[in-house]
């Protein structure tokens, strides 16, 4: 009749639930304080709003990556998918405003299709997702080069670029609110609601123990495939925002997959699945961006970005691994 | 000790072993002479495997001594035991399928000439070795993966002999063999005997034990019950030694004959890779117990009905209508629930909350049918009704005791209002209080009209709970027993001493 009680220490620390968002909130708070000391202006509405808008793509990618990781898989293809989307958009729109909306829809469909293929190859053909999405990464890189003869062609319309560039002006208190931030908030709320739904709870259960899920009637392959589709859709939205903000290049999506994975891990989501919150993943991305901003303020070389990312991934996984094995 | 037998090869004295405070072996004595086949029999969990691991260096005993070839030994591990001359042939072979017979036989101690592996010498020595045990048809350069199970077993034995084994332990050597291959094994065992090798032969199948062994040791609950000369005993006597414990616990009343409803599930000549020609009827209102040894097809039966590894032959009808149960989902939609034997591995999602665990199946299959709030409310009521204790609904399930975890799993299935429930070892690893709560619940479900199939290795539980008992052996139904059957009758069917008959 007894349950294993967490040992009560004489001096009780606030109980940190594994997979909760408390640790990442604490880290974020520390960074905010550090930024506030070094560069107080940064926290004033104008630059803060613009920072949040700039961070929207990576935060969305982290949310997309979260769905895949929490279900027990990986998606390494999102970076090259973003590049492909931006290049495709430029060539198809070819500066014609009338083509903006059809192309936006096409990009979303393209993202969903790539996710679908990733998902089906992983679940039905039983290729480990690490390999599936690495293969997809390479396929997209090559295909885009081939399709555009080595240099991006065409151009984005101003209508297309406004998603990543423009803002609601003169909002009370906040001032200038980028469209990207609004898109982010809407989709973040949708992601949270999705994770509270039957689908969301089932997705985490699949990552926790797919055998149990299967024997309880869950179609594990469908659930995981849907997670890949969500990741592909997130990449499409990120591409639309990024294309508008920073323009068309073959480097548009470079390294974003690792940024997203780092963010997810930093946000307390267990690699291998089954634990963690989507809010944690998004806060992880925000924290990462803030860290890079801080490094910038302190004049640390931008070349250190990937080193820092690598170190964070190793550290975060090591911390969560030792914590869960010490139980 | 005016024994005419030669000095024993192996002598165990007072072997005791405990795991986590549970006594698995207690004061076991046993000896094997060169050229003798000494059989060890007993129920699942009697301590056979642990004893064999102690002899072969896998475990070291807490108490007692192991004497081998005239000296007291304490092996530091399996390799140490191998070097001393103790070989073990496991049920699952340890062979490299992509390597040749010779490479497997000499794996890790390849003959070397001038610093390189002497392939030709290795092949030649393997041939001689195989010939010495009468195997002239098995090519030494064949890839092991291409060989049949019986031939792979020969390779395993040759592997042990290449290390000069004087004592061979065979753990259920016929479990994987077809009938005609068993004869080959018999021949092999006799030739090993002629070479003066002592054999410890562990088996569930009494027929083999009588065919091969000179003496038999019966283990029960970790103790040696008796050691007898095979010629002086009978199958019935052995079975009596293997069981024979009092029914002490309380079990809920059985169903009265008039409470048994119509046939819900009917299997006719149903089979798949692990089952053949299973004929079985499951009625509303009854608890049908399924007995048999591990690997006899009990779990395979439940998993086939639930569509995990579906039947490939025969007919299944549900309420007189033919059905094909292709997957757990189709089975669930047909009103079937399955509580698995492996709670940790496939019964719970460990890091999710009690509530999420209990909702898992309803969300997956009947999500559209009922409102979210109503469903959650119902599951909370069920969790309260099965009396999950010491935990809030939001606690991660892995922190609960085994009994409470099992109750949550039950709530998950009860939420679907199943009409057929398949329980595989429902009380394994569960404390006494939770155990009787689960027994009561199982009986209450039957009384409310559900058809219950319950697999159990726990004989008192099987006898105490079941309205009828079907005993499985080698993937088919060995026989059926009415309520009030004895442990001896169940075991006799399970090990194959009783004539197969439907009571």
Image (tube, coloured by chain):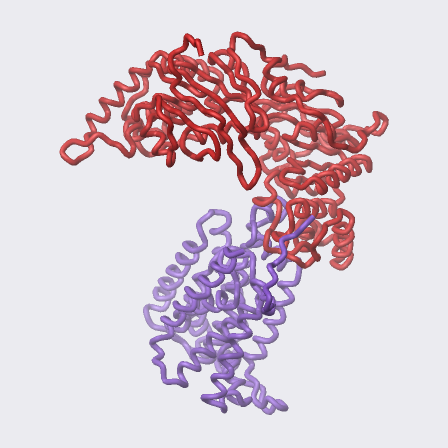
Chain colours: A purple, B red
Query: Which residue corresponds to the image point at 63% horizontal and 56% vertical from the top-left?
Result: A5
Q: Residue B131, percent across and down? A: 29, 16
Instruction: Farthest residue to the left: give it.
Output: B114
> Where does the image place residue B413, in percent across and percent down from the top left?
71, 45
Q: Relative to B257, does residue B355 appear above or below in the rendering?
A: below
Left or right placement of residue A199 versus residue B1 in this view: right
Describe residue B365's horizontal placement relative to residue B138 as left or right.
right
- Of B146 and A21, which appears nearest the observer? A21
Asked if residue A232 lies left or right of residue B438, the reply is left
| Residue B136 on image: x %, y % | 30, 15
* Residue for point 75% across, 22% down: B484
Viewer-side residue, B143 vs A87: B143
In this view, B71 is above or below B19: above
**Which quadrant of the view contains residue A299?**
bottom left
* Total numbered labels placed on residues in the image: 0
Name the quadrant containing residue B161: top left
Which residue is pictured at 80% across the width and 29% down the height? B254
């Amino acid at each position: 009749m007894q349950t294993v009680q967490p040992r009560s220490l004489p001096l009780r620390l606030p109980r940190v639930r594994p997979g909760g968002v408390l640790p990442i909130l604490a880290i974020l708070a520390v960074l905010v304080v550090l930024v506030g000391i070094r560069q107080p202006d940064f926290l004033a509405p104008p630059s803060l709003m613009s920072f949040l808008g700039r961070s929207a793509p990576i935060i969305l990618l982290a949310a997309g990556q979260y769905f895949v990781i929490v279900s027990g898989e990986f998606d390494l293809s999102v970076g090259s998918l973003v590049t492909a989307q931006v290049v495709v958009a430029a060539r198809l729109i070819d500066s014609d405003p009338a083509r903006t909306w059809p192309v936006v829809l096409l990009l979303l469909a393209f993202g969903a299709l790539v996710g679908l293929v990733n998902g089906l190859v992983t679940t039905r053909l039983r290729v480990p997702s690490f390999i599936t999405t690495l293969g997809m990464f390479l396929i997209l890189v090559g295909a885009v080069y081939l399709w555009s003869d080595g240099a991006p062609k065409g151009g984005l319309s101003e209508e297309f670029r406004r998603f990543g560039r423009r803002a609601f002006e003169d909002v009370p208190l906040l001032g200038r609110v980028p469209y990207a931030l609004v898109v982010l908030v809407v989709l973040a709320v949708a992601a949270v609601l999705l994770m509270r739904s039957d689908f969301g709870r089932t997705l985490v259960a699949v990552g926790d123990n797919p055998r149990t899920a299967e024997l309880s009637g869950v179609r594990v392959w469908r659930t995981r495939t849907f997670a890949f589709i969500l990741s592909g859709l997130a990449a499409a939205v990120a591409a639309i925002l990024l294309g508008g903000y920073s323009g068309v290049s073959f480097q548009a999506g470079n390294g974003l997959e690792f940024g997203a994975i780092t963010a997810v891990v930093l946000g307390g989501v267990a690699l291998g699945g089954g634990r963690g919150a989507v809010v944690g993943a998004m806060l992880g991305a925000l924290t990462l961006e803030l860290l890079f901003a801080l490094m910038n303020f302190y004049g640390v070389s931008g070349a250190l970005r990937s080193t820092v990312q690598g170190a964070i991934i190793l550290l975060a996984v090591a911390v969560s691994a030792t914590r869960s094995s010490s139980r | 000790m005016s024994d005419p037998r030669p000095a024993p090869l192996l002598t165990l004295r007072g072997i005791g072993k405990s795991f986590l405070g549970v006594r698995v072996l207690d004061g076991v004595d046993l000896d094997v002479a060169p050229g003798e086949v000494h059989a060890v029999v007993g129920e699942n969990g009697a301590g056979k495997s642990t004893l064999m691991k102690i002899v072969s260096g896998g475990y070291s005993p807490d108490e007692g001594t192991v004497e081998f070839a005239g000296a007291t030994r304490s092996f530091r591990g399996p390799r140490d035991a191998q070097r001393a001359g103790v070989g073990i042939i496991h049920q699952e072979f340890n062979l490299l399928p992509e390597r040749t017979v010779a490479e497997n036989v000499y794996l890790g101690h390849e003959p070397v000439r001038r610093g390189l592996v002497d392939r030709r010498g290795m092949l030649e020595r393997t041939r001689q070795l195989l010939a010495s045990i009468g195997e002239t048809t098995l090519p030494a350069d064949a890839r092991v993966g291409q060989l049949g199970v019986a031939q792979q077993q020969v390779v395993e034995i040759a592997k042990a002999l290449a290390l000069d084994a004087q004592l061979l332990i065979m753990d259920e050597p016929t479990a994987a063999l077809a009938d005609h291959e068993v004869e080959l094994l018999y021949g092999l065992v006799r030739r090993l005997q002629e070479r003066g090798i002592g054999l410890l032969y562990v088996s569930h199948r009494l027929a083999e034990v009588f065919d091969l062994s000179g003496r038999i040791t019966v283990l029960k609950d970790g103790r040696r019950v008796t050691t007898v000369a095979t010629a002086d005993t009978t199958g019935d006597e052995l079975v009596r030694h293997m069981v024979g414990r009092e029914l002490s616990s309380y079990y809920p009343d059985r169903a009265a004959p008039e409470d048994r409803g119509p046939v819900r599930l009917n299997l006719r000549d149903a089979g798949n890779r692990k089952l053949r020609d299973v004929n079985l009827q499951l009625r509303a209102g009854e608890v049908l117990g399924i007995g048999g040894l591990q690997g006899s097809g009990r779990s395979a039966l439940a998993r086939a009905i639930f569509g995990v590894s579906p039947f490939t032959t025969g007919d299944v009808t549900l309420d007189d209508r033919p059905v094909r149960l292709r997957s757990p989902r189709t089975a669930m939609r047909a009103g079937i629930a399955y509580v698995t034997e492996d709670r940790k591995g496939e019964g719970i999602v460990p890091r999710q909350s009690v509530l999420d665990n209990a909702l898992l199946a309803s969300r997956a299959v009947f999500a559209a049918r009922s409102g979210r709030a109503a469903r959650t409310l119902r599951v909370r009521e069920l969790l309260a009704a099965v009396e999950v204790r010491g935990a809030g609904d939001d606690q991660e399930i892995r922190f609960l005791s085994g009994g409470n975890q099992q109750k949550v799993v039950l709530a998950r299935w009860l939420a679907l209002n199943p009409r057929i429930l398949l329980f595989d070892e429902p009380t394994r690893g569960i404390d006494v209080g939770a155990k009787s709560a689960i027994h009561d619940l199982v009986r209450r479900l039957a009384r409310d009209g559900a058809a219950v199939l319950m697999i159990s290795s726990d004989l008192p539980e099987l006898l105490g709970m079941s309205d009828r008992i079907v005993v499985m052996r080698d993937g088919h139904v060995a026989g059926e027993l009415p309520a009030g059957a004895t442990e001896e009758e169940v075991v006799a069917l399970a090990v194959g001493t009783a004539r197969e008959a439907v009571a």
